[in-house]
Image (cartoon, rainbow, N blue to C red):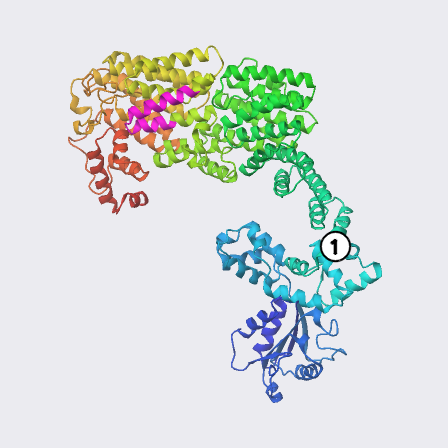
């Protein structure tokens, strides 16, 4: 209701001497006129102003005593369009006699007035001079008001943008229809989840359905077909379209439209466009139309819509289907899918084709046309297991021509590998497709061969992929198709970049990024994004941004959403390794949510999220993320990603002192990389795998790993792998020095760690740099401690249980160096090696090591690596000399957390167990328990969970 009208009413009722006000409120059925009157009746009362209801057309609904109108009154007149002649005459007299300080509000449906535009009937009323006459028109709700109503009824979870849009579209924003439909959704079982499909399935509320049927029935049989035509068209339509679909002819059709508008069976929805005020009632009207008549209406509707530009082929197809014209239906579906695909609306095309092919009785020749179209859209446009199931069924159709079946098998194989991550199955399907297509469709045979060039999948070796590359290049050259040559080149780029082929960057420059052919442009975009992904794994981080930017822009222009999404995963990996951790966890989770229907596509994000959780000490969450939260088998991860995830899992297992299990994990993960033969991909696995085998006492296997890694890399330009190789050698050197009781070799191990740190600094990779810097400092301190004489100052003997001596099993499990684990381990100081002692013989070396550890602890803190920072500071505290001037004994922390208590509490609140905290901080589990008890007592925490909040 307008603000000015409301203010006029308020003024009239607030002052006994104010001029009376008459307000007419116009609103079609369901817009809330009666609700408005009830709200006005509930306004704050004044003793001087009475409220009177006048319900028109209802026996006893009118006031009886005319003399009552001499007092200030708010008269609420509901549905004046229902009043008869006598009632209107009486109402006129009452309104003309309104006294000062009085007001009247009169509501009506304009479509049901006997005299259009005259709510009090004809002739027009002559109003007294002193009476202020106002008018207001109620309007449908906008989407925001519909959203508010949905939130009130269904809660915030039920008012998704999708649901609100469907509610607003179906009801036309008519409040009564919105409220009734929400009531249906509230009672829906299973509970409403906020999808448009659920809104559509809820049905039509009784009130609007009965209203439209009564108004349609009130028309003569000669005029009803025009309303039926509107129901079949199911949307705003022009007059000529309605008349054409109705089959009435120009003159009878025009007359029928006028009658339909007069009876309010139809409404004018826009200039020259007509339909139902509540659009969802169209289905109710259609259901009342006799079948043969309805089919004729649909046939004429298909013809009418075919004349629109652009043609809505999906709607045309539905009308042909409803008319029983199945061949025309399938042709229209094909055109609709082609049109959607051409404009990049692949998901729309996929949904239409899936629904069509799932229908029974589709002729083989139609399936042969539609199925390849579905496959092409599915591979390009992000569709999931539903499409795989459809394609798997179609390729079993013996009636399909061999060329068509081979094409479908090719697309099925691509989906299994690229989108579903079912590599073994997908590889087998692609091999069959390549053989099936070799004789009948050479260009598609080349495409299948090109797919088998891609090296990321576990299983086939690098040499196998090279063999397929030779075949694919020959097939593409024989065919002469430029788009296919570009597809082969894009995969050649990925293969060459993966193993650091010296010619790889020249291949990238050969990609036709300026091509005006959309098919070539899509393949070039894929090649650029392949190069960016490989550059991340190789460690060429400075080149990644340019490749990703150009690749994504080209993918967007050419309509390649899968390539766009895969580039987003590469970006997350880049941010992890280059230390751009602020907000990275949220970006990973957002990407996972956006690609929920294809978990394989989000595998990069899962792994990065898991790596973050490891660094932050959230080990339970880390394992969950690294295992893809059960959405996807980690054994099917791309080889470099699987190796990275395996390295993180091995690291966690070592930190928990489960050395034998970590060694088994290392052997299994290493076998996958070795079988593939792409050695740069071992970079994220090697240091942790070498550590696991060394701590398990299998130094021969650890040496073999380092040797194979070095030989596999050769002289190739792979900066990240080269840094990892130096790191692995440092790990092995530290392990052997401690295991064999040769502390004099530890400085050499420290130097290797420093070289690795310097290499990572150049990339840059700040986290790896900090881990290797920590290793260098730890080795120096261990060497100095081995030359000392008093073990009491090295570590509390009670804290050295569980194999955590000077080198520290925890230091290795948590960082990048090596520690022993009893007889099965490397023989750390205090556990079968040299005795740990505190006074150091080289203060300068100790100071340098402490400076290194302080530096890496700060780097960990800056990154947000809570677990690593806590571990580094714990190592510092066990090795730093006492400050001069400090009184003997421990400092007092009677009412505040001591530094050690704070460290323990921080790790405990992250979810680590006492045993895991002990391994991290060089303590015994009993000491950890005591520190946690102290922290809870000082903070007033009631539990570990509460301790996190108190901190």
Judge by depth and name the residue closer to the eye, 796 or 281: 281
Q: Residue at x 31, y 26 (%)?
A: 661
The percent position of residue 498, horizontal first and vertical second, equals 51, 19
Q: Residues within 10 Å of mark 1 (few under 14, many from 20)?
A: many
Regarding residue 828, the answer to whether it shows in the image is yes
Q: Vertically, is 213 above or below 66?
A: above
Q: Quadrant of residue 875?
A: top left
The percent position of residue 550, horizontal first and vertical second, equals 60, 27
| Relative side of 328 to 684, left or right | right
Regarding residue 172, the answer to whether it shows in the image is no
Q: Which residue is mark 1?
A: 297
| Relative side of 390 to 946, left or right | right
Quadrant of the drawing holding the N terminus: bottom right
Q: Main secondary structure of the magenta part?
A: helix
Q: Quadrant of residue 710?
A: top left
The percent position of residue 885, horizontal first and vertical second, equals 19, 28
Q: Which residues are magenta?
A: 648-672
| Relative side of 306 to 375, left or right | right
Q: Vertically, is 55 above or below 866?
A: below
The percent position of residue 349, horizontal first and vertical second, equals 64, 39
Q: Is residue 666 magenta?
A: yes
Judge by depth and name the residue closer to the eye, 230 or 96: 230
């Amino acid at each position: 209701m307008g603000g000015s009208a409301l203010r006029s009413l308020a003024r009239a009722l607030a002052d006994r001497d104010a001029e009376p006000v008459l307000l007419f409120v116009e609103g079609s059925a369901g817009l809330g006129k009666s609700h408005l009157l009830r709200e006005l009746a509930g306004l704050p009362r004044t003793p001087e102003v009475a409220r009177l209801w006048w319900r028109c057309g209802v026996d006893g609904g009118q006031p009886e005593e005319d003399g009552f109108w001499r007092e200030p009154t708010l008269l609420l007149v509901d549905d004046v369009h229902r009043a008869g002649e006598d009632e209107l005459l009486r109402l006129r007299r009452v309104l003309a006699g309104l006294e000062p300080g009085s007001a009247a509000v009169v509501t009506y449906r304009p479509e049901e007035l006997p005299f259009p535009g005259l709510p009090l009937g004809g002739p027009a009323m002559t109003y007294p001079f002193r009476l202020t006459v106002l008018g207001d028109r109620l309007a449908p709700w906008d989407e925001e008001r519909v959203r508010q109503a949905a939130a009130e009824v269904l809660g915030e979870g039920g008012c998704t943008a999708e649901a609100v849009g469907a509610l607003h579209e179906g009801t036309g924003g008519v409040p009564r229809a919105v409220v009734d439909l929400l009531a249906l959704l509230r009672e829906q079982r299973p509970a409403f989840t906020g999808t448009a499909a659920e809104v559509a399935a809820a049905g039509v509320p009784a009130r609007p359905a009965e209203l439209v049927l009564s108004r349609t029935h009130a028309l003569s049989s000669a005029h009803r077909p025009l309303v039926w035509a509107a129901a079949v068209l199911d949307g705003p339509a022009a007059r000529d379209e309605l008349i054409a679909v109705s089959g009435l002819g120009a003159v009878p059709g025009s007359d029928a439209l006028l009658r339909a508008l007069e009876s309010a069976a139809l409404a004018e929805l826009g200039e020259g466009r007509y339909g139902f005020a509540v659009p969802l009632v169209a289905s109710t009207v259609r259901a009342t139309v006799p079948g043969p008549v309805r089919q004729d209406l649909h046939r004429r509707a298909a013809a009418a819509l075919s004349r629109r530009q652009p043609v809505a082929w999906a709607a045309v197809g539905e009308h042909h289907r409803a008319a029983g014209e199945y061949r025309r239906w399938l042709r229209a579906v094909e055109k609709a899918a082609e049109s959607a695909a051409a404009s990049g609306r692949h998901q729309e095309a996929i949904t239409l084709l899936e629904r069509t092919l799932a229908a029974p009785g589709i002729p083989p020749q139609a399936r042969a046309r539609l199925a390849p179209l579905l496959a092409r859209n599915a591979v390009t446009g992000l569709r999931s297991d539903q499409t795989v199931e459809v394609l798997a069924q179609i390729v079993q159709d013996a009636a399909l021509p061999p060329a068509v079946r081979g094409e479908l098998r090719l697309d099925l194989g691509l989906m299994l590998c690229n989108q579903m991550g079912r590599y073994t199955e997908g590889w087998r399907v692609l091999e069959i497709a390549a053989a099936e297509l070799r004789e009948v469709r050479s260009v598609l045979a080349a495409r299948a061969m090109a797919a088998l060039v891609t090296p990321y999948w576990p299983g086939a070796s690098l040499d196998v992929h090279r063999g397929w590359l030779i075949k694919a290049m020959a097939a593409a050259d024989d065919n002469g198709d430029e788009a296919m040559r570009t597809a082969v080149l894009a995969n050649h780029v990925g293969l060459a970049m993966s193993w650091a082929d010296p010619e790889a960057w020249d291949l990238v420059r050969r990609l036709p990024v300026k091509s005006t052919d959309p098919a070539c442009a899509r393949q070039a975009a894929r090649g650029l994004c392949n190069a960016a992904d490989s550059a991340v794994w190789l460690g060429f981080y400075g080149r990644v941004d340019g490749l990703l930017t150009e690749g994504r822009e080209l993918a967007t222009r050419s309509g390649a959403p899968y390539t766009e999404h895969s580039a987003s995963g590469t970006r997350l990996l880049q941010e992890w390794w280059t230390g751009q951790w602020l907000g990275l966890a949220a970006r990973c989770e957002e990407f996972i949510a956006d690609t929920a229907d294809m978990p394989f596509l989000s595998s990069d994000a899962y792994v990065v999220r898991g790596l973050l959780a490891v660094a932050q000490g959230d080990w339970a969450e880390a394992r969950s993320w690294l295992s893809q939260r059960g959405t996807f088998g980690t054994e099917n991860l791309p080889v470099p990603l699987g190796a990275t995830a395996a390295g993180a899992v091995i690291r966690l297992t070592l930190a928990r002192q489960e050395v034998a299990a970590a060694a088994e994990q290392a052997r299994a993960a290493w076998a996958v990389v070795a079988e593939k033969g792409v050695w740069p991909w071992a970079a994220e696995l090697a240091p942790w795998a070498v550590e696991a085998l060394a701590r398990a006492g299998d130094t021969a296997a650890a040496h073999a790993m380092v040797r194979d890694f070095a030989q596999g890399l050769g002289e190739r330009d792979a900066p990240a792998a080269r840094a990892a190789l130096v790191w692995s050698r440092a790990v092995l050197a530290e392990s052997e020095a401690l295991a064999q009781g040769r502390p004099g070799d530890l400085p050499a191990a420290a130097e290797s760690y420093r070289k690795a740190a310097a290499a990572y600094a150049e990339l840059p990779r700040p986290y790896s740099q900090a881990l290797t810097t920590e290793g260098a400092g730890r080795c120096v301190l261990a060497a100095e401690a081995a030359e000392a004489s008093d073990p009491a100052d090295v570590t509390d003997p009670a804290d050295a249980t569980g194999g955590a001596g000077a080198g520290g099993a925890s230091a290795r499990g948590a960082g990048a160096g090596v520690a022993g684990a009893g007889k099965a381990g490397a023989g750390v100081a205090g556990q079968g090696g040299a005795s740990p002692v505190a006074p150091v013989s080289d203060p300068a070396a100790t100071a340098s090591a402490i400076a290194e550890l302080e530096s890496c602890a700060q780097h960990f803190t800056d990154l947000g690596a809570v677990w690593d920072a806590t571990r580094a500071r714990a190592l510092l505290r066990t090795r730093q000399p006492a400050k001069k001037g400090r009184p003997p004994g421990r400092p007092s922390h009677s009412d505040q957390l001591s530094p050690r208590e704070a460290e323990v509490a921080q790790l405990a609140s992250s979810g680590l167990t006492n045993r895991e905290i002990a391994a991290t901080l060089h303590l015994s589990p009993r000491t950890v328990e005591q520190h946690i008890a102290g922290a809870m007592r000082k903070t007033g925490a009631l539990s570990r969970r509460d301790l996190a909040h108190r901190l």
